[in-house]
Structure formats: structure tokens, C-alpha cells
Image (cartoon, helix red, strand yellow):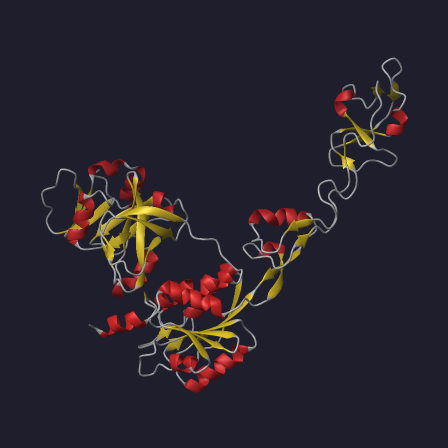
């Protein structure tokens, strides 16, 4: 039994770790006043009330002639009341002084403002009274409402320019003598300090305000001082750097010494290098230094904590897909697998992206991801699974899946989206045979096709392009082939 397997048996599962974190930390009470048009997506911390009545005065409800109803009391069919020069008003205009009703313009002769009324006009007829749309101080939106784009216009129209929204302050501390600032070319052994920007982008939709510390060296006193500098200023501290196993890793030992350990490792990939402690009332988190696990662990545990604090974000769209290739997973670990999803014929197909050394590229290529729970050893080709989309819900319908001996394809920004999935020749042929991709790039001499594939499109050097014949009639596939300069289809 290997070491990682033994350790995994002692680590809490993903769901239990998340429950412990949420139970350990009550919600902070921070709020901030923001301009309405900058607050879309934020959660209201206080109810919003109208700044004034709408309309603010009596206005015409129809185009017509403003009259004083008291002057029409005697009107009858055999004794009409004649108004020679009525005051013309348009819909929404305030009524002239000493008038309280509006007679529709259709009651006048064309081009005239003369009226001959054969019945009395009620006061308020044809009038929209002050405050009938909104009373001064009327409740517009309750606390807890997530502000939507469609809310902005009506709020501003009702005299609301600022709203109070919930706010969580997050401090991020990047550590490591090898880090350089974003925009700097890293030298040998160096890397860019990208984690503060990544965490800020992930937490901003929840209303979190992220502040980054300057890069801190691998020194226990320096790490401790950076945490202390944030203690009274933020609601969460996240320290990035190391895994707790490296010879220069000090982050995890420093964070463990700060207070009560809530979670120290999780049975998830990534997850073993995750630590959260309670330092007084302050949550302090230690994350590894690599960007990919930092992003996933932030989504795994920090985002649910913010949601429990009343700062949820819109859930990503979910769809069911048929897997094009099998996926292996350790049954003791929860895992997140990047996928490329596209509609092939009538089916949504999801193909796993390479992991390991190609993990960074896979993140850029993927438009979906599959969360594999604990106790699941993987999935077989053609299994039906639910995935989270990373793009808009219509994205898969515009995606062309290209598999095989291919790294990148650069196409113009308009037209179909190319999803490149590098894979072995056997896997590419299997995807073609199952009609689970749009286009394959194969190496070597073309072999004799199976009945369902492939339509050989073109050879370029030692590679050749193939596709299931029925799919080349798909407009998005034809557009992609044209952009690639492939005309034999």
C-alpha cells in the first residue's frame, strides 16, 4: 500500500471538509455603499426604497384636453357644456393649474381643441395621480437580493443612486523567493505571482474585495508578519506557496501554529495540500503555489464559505454529456477533470483533456469540467454524466471537436470554436468510429476506412485529416474546414 493511499484514508472527504469549514466561521457583517451601476451582481445588505413618488405630481394618462371637472357638472345630451379653447396636454405631462381631468383628444374635431361635452367628467378621469406608480419611500428591493442589470434603470429612475451591498474582504499573500511580479519576464527558476489575480477573479462575482500583499520570502517571520498585517483589515487570509513537503516550504508550518486547525488536507485532487485554521475569529488558509490547484481549491472551499455567508454567485450552467473517452480516477479522492464539449450530430459529447504536464494548456482548451466524487473509480466511454459548462450555454453548439495529433489551431475570432483535444492515435480512431468527434488529425499512412469512417479530407506532410462522412455536412464543420484551408469535402 503506497503512502498517498494510506494518507488518503485518514483525510476527510470533500463534503465533510466543506461542512467543517462552514460550521467553523460565522458570517462577517461588512458592507459597502456602491453606485447602482457598479453594483450589478452584488448582494444587497439593506432594503432599497424609492427616493420620491412616481409620478411626483398628477400627470395626463392620455393625450387630450385638460379640463376642470367642476365645470362639466351640468353637461347633458340636450344641453352640452362647450369648452372653446381647452388646454392641450400629452401623456405624462403635468396638468395645468385648476384642472383635474383629461378628455381624450379623439373627442375633439380634427385639428381643434373645442369640446362639446354631453356628460359630466369625473375628477381624475384620464389622469395618473401622483404616487400611483411608486409612493415616496416605497420598498423597491429587499435585503439579500442580487442586483441584476434590469434593476439598474428602474432604481435610478426612482431616485436611487447608491446601494448598500454585502462585502467580504480577502487578503492574499503570495510567498516564495522565486516569484516575480505580473508583467515581468521570469528568469531561470522563477515564475509569475499570478495567484492573487486568479483568486480576485474567482471571488469578485461573490462581492469579495481582494487585496494582495507584496511577495513574501520563504521565511517564517516574514510570513507571520504578513498575516498579522492583514489581521484587523480582512475577513479571510489566504497564503499561497509550497505544499508543506518542500525543503523551503514554511507556509503550512506557520499557518498550523496560528490556532485551531479546522481542516488539514482533504481526500481530493487537488486537496491534500490544503489547510485552514481559526486564528482567533479569523479564517487563515494555506494553499499550494501552483496556479491550477489554487484555483480549484478556492472554488472547492472558499466559494462555498462565501455562499454560506450570504454571498452566492450564479451557479454555472450544467448539461448532460456522453463521454467520448474513458476517465480514470482514484476511488479515494474527489477529482475535477477538464473537458471539451461539443454537439456532434444530435449528441453532446465530452472528451477529457490531457492532465499532468499538459494541465496548464488543458485549462485554456477546456469549456467544461466533470467533478468525479469519492468512491468512483472512473467512467467508461459513452457513459452519460453531468458537467459544468465554463462558457455560455450555447457554446457547445458552436464548438468543433478536433482530436488526435494536434496541439493548437488558430482560427479567426468569428465562426465556429475549435476545441483541440490531443490524444493517442488509437483514441482518435475510436472517437471517429463512435462518431464522437468532428475531425481527427492522424499520423502515418491512411488505413482502409471502416464503414462509418473516415472520410479522408487532406494530407499534410506526415499527418492527414479525417471525419465521419455525415458530419462534414454540418455547417459549423464546413466552416471550420474552410478556415483550415481544407476544401476536399
In the image, residue 370 above or below residue 211: above
Residue 448: image location, x then y, percent: 9, 42
Q: Can residue 355 be seen from the camera position used here?
A: yes
Task: Work out which quarter of the rendered image holds the C terminus and state it.
Answer: top left
Q: Left or right: 469 with respect to 304?
A: left
Q: Left or right: 92 with respect to 331?
A: right
Q: Quadrant of residue 11?
A: bottom left
Q: Quadrant of residue 339?
A: bottom left
In the image, residue 336 above or below residue 260: above
Residue 100: image location, x then y, percent: 84, 33
In the image, residue 196 above or below residue 165: below
Q: Left or right: 465 with respect to 19?
A: left
Determine the residue located farthest toward the top in the rendered image.
78
Q: Can residue 295 be seen from the camera position used here?
A: no
**Residue drawn at x 35%, y 67% as measured from the top left:** 293
Task: Work out which quarter of the rendered image holds the N terminus and state it.
Answer: bottom left
**Residue drawn at x 20%, y 40% as measured from the top left:** 468
Q: Left or right: 406 with respect to 145?
A: left
Residue 254: image location, x then y, percent: 42, 82
Nearer-the-camera pick, 135 or 225: 135
**Residue drawn at x 28%, y 38% as measured from the top left:** 345
Amino acid at each position: 500500500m503506497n503512502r498517498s493511499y494510506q494518507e488518503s484514508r485518514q483525510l476527510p472527504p470533500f463534503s465533510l471538509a466543506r461542512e467543517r469549514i462552514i460550521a467553523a466561521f460565522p458570517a462577517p457583517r461588512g458592507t459597502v455603499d456602491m453606485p447602482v451601476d457598479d453594483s450589478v451582481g452584488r448582494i444587497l445588505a439593506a432594503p432599497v426604497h424609492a427616493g420620491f413618488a412616481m409620478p411626483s405630481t398628477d400627470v395626463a394618462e392620455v393625450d387630450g384636453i385638460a379640463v376642470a371637472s367642476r365645470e362639466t357638472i351640468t353637461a347633458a345630451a340636450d344641453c352640452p357644456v362647450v369648452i372653446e379653447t381647452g388646454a392641450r396636454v400629452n401623456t405624462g405631462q403635468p396638468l395645468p393649474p385648476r384642472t383635474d381631468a383629461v378628455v381624450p383628444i379623439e373627442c375633439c374635431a380634427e385639428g381643434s381643441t373645442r369640446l362639446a361635452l354631453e356628460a359630466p367628467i369625473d375628477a381624475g378621469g384620464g389622469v395618473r395621480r401622483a404616487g400611483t406608480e411608486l409612493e415616496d419611500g416605497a420598498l423597491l428591493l429587499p435585503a439579500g437580493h442580487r442586483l441584476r442589470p434590469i434593476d439598474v434603470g428602474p432604481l435610478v429612475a426612482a431616485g436611487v443612486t447608491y446601494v448598500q451591498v454585502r462585502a467580504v474582504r480577502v487578503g492574499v499573500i503570495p510567498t516564495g523567493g522565486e516569484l516575480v511580479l505580473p508583467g515581468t519576464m521570469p528568469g531561470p527558476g522563477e515564475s509569475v505571482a499570478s495567484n492573487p489575480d486568479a483568486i480576485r477573479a474567482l471571488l469578485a462575482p461573490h462581492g469579495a474585495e481582494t487585496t494582495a500583499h507584496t511577495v513574501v520570502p520563504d521565511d517564517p517571520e516574514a510570513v507571520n508578519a504578513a498575516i498579522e498585517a492583514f489581521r484587523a483589515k480582512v475577513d479571510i487570509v489566504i497564503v499561497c506557496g509550497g505544499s508543506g513537503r518542500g525543503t523551503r516550504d514554511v507556509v503550512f508550518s506557520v499557518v498550523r501554529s496560528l490556532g485551531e486547525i479546522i481542516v488539514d488536507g482533504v481526500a481530493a485532487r487537488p486537496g491534500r495540500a490544503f489547510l485552514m485554521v481559526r486564528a482567533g475569529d479569523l479564517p487563515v488558509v494555506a494553499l499550494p503555489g501552483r496556479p491550477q490547484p489554487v484555483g480549484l481549491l478556492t472554488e472547492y472551499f472558499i466559494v462555498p464559505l462565501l455562499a454560506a455567508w450570504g454571498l452566492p454567485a450564479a451557479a454555472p450552467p450544467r448539461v448532460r454529456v456522453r463521454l467520448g473517452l474513458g476517465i480514470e480516477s482514484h476511488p479515494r479522492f474527489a477529482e475535477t477533470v477538464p473537458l471539451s464539449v461539443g454537439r456532434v450530430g444530435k449528441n453532446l459529447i465530452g472528451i477529457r483533456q490531457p492532465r499532468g504536464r499538459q494541465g496548464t494548456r488543458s485549462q485554456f482548451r477546456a469549456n467544461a469540467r466533470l467533478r468525479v466524487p469519492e468512491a468512483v473509480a472512473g467512467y467508461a466511454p459513452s457513459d452519460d454524466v453531468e458537467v459544468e459548462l465554463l462558457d455560455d450555454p450555447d457554446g457547445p453548439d458552436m464548438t468543433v471537436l478536433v482530436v488526435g495529433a494536434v496541439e493548437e489551431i488558430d482560427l479567426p475570432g468569428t465562426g465556429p470554436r475549435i476545441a483541440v483535444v490531443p490524444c493517442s492515435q488509437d483514441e482518435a480512431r475510436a472517437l471517429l468510429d463512435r462518431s464522437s468527434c468532428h475531425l481527427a488529425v492522424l499520423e502515418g499512412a491512411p488505413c482502409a476506412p471502416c464503414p462509418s469512417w473516415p472520410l479522408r479530407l487532406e494530407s499534410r506532410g506526415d499527418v492527414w485529416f479525417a471525419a465521419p462522412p455525415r458530419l462534414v455536412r454540418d455547417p459549423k464543420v464546413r466552416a471550420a474546414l474552410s478556415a483550415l484551408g481544407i476544401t476536399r469535402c
